[in-house]
Amino acid sequence: MSARAPTAAALLLAAALARGQGRPPAETAGQPRSTAVYPEQDISLRFSHRQHLALRNAHCMQCHWLVPGSDHSYDRNIPEEARCAACHRIEAASRGEKVDPPSACRDCHPGFDFTVHKAPRPSTFPAPNLLFSHVRHLARGSGCADCHGSMEAVELATRAQLPRMATCLQCHDGAKASADCATCHPRALKARGGLVETHFASGELRPGPGNPLGLDHGPRYERFHSQVAARQREQCMACHSEASCGKCHEGAIRPQSIHPGDYISTHMVPARQGVERCDACHRRQSFCVACHERTGVGSNADAPFYDPTKARVHPSTWLVPGPGHHGVQAARNIASCASCHREEQCLGCHASAVGTTSGTHVNPHPPGFAGRCRDLARKNDRACAKCHDLSQPSDAAARCR
């Protein structure tokens, strides 16, 4: 932005705005800032806001006079040396004259000697990775202290005086101003489908401790992020797409951090409590059964891997009549049984056929079943044929006695 002289009206307006119009100052000092939002600065200056604001009739816009016309976050609103020369007699000090206020180069540039160096080491103030307009905020009555906090006790202003998200949300609450993330955070290129950009040269935009929306993406966040997503889906979808969710929830490879260490030794407890949650990522037939058989757990394991000490996965009441009997459990959820057991295992006990599959004639039917078995057989006797040899009259008669 080109330099221009401030009008008297602009200075009077700026002075009123600088006082915050009676609003409480923003709490900003002493709190960490994300380098993804505010890149690190390299400031080779000595300056005291405290001393300057203590002067009579001093206000922010006397030095930051370009702010009323600043419409972008990358505008450089830091005063140049020519602005300082309005009060500091720099040329006289360079000739060795005694001046007040101090105006020698080393008074503002520590260690600088103009007889040795041509110019002081430049400071770097990278532009924030934000969308921001001073023009629009000033037009709505915002004051300097509303965003930057009180400067009366501040020496050199740094990133610590730039507003944090909690400060912005005092106004950006969806009522007074938009709460849409893309209002302040720039969107990415088309490669990310217009989502909020999260990767910058200065760091990754990742909500941390104290995030005012409760979106702290700290350690183990993947363990409870579903609860947050259920409450604040719109916030999540500002940065994450459905495809990013699918990388874990539908992909072939999931992050190992989903489960705690040595989870394989304890996974059977949560698996019994909530099979549906396991099924969200794992397919029982291709994942669970294959692992059990490879490790010798279950009677289906191949002979080289079978270990009788590991094969028992059912409780001791599994074959005892009562609520814990395997027949009761199978009636409740046969799909759970089928995830580990093949049909021939059931036939090994329940079949009565004398053919290739000979069982031990254990009757799987409940009391009174004979009264309705004929009707069931008329509709579809293929289920009967699993256990009974329908070609043998003796077996065919026995099945409905």
Image (cartoon, grey):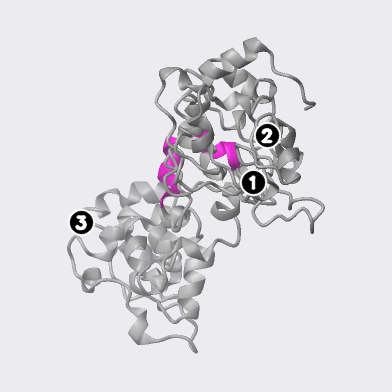
At 19% from the left and 70% from the top, the residue drawn is 320
At 38% from the left and 57% from the top, the residue drawn is 334
Foreground of the two, 18 or 347: 18
Task: Characterize the local packing of mark 2: few (<14), some (14-19) or many (20 or more) Cα atoms within 10 angstroms.
Answer: some
At 45% from the left and 77% from the top, the residue drawn is 300
Verify CB contact (< 8 Å) between mark 1 and mark 2. Answer: yes
> Residue 18's x, y, as percent?
52, 23
Q: Would you place residue 344 above or below residue 226 in this image? A: below
Q: Would you place residue 104 above or below residue 86 in this image? A: below
Say whether disc 1 or disc 3 marks the residue closer to the N-terminus.
1
Q: CA distance from mark 1 to mark 2?
A: 10 Å
Q: Report if residue 139 is visible in the image.
A: no
Foreground of the two, 54 or 306: 54
Asked if the stretch drawn in magenta spans residue 239, the answer is yes
Name the main secondary structure of what is drawn in magenta: helix
Residue to which mark 2 is pinned: 84
Residue to which mark 1 is pinned: 108
At 43% from the left and 29% from the top, the residue drawn is 25
Name the amino acid, label 1: Cys
Say whether disc 1 or disc 2 marks the residue closer to the N-terminus.
2
Say whether disc 3 or disc 2 marks the residue closer to the N-terminus.
2
Q: Spot the residue most to the top.
A: 9
> Residue 273's x, y, as percent?
31, 57
The image quarter containing residue 60 is top right
Is residue 276 toward the left or the right of residue 139 in the image?
Answer: left
Point out the frontmost of discs 1 and 3: 1
The quadrant the N terminus occupies is top right
Residue stretch rendered in magenta on the structure: 224-240
Residue to which mark 3 is pinned: 367
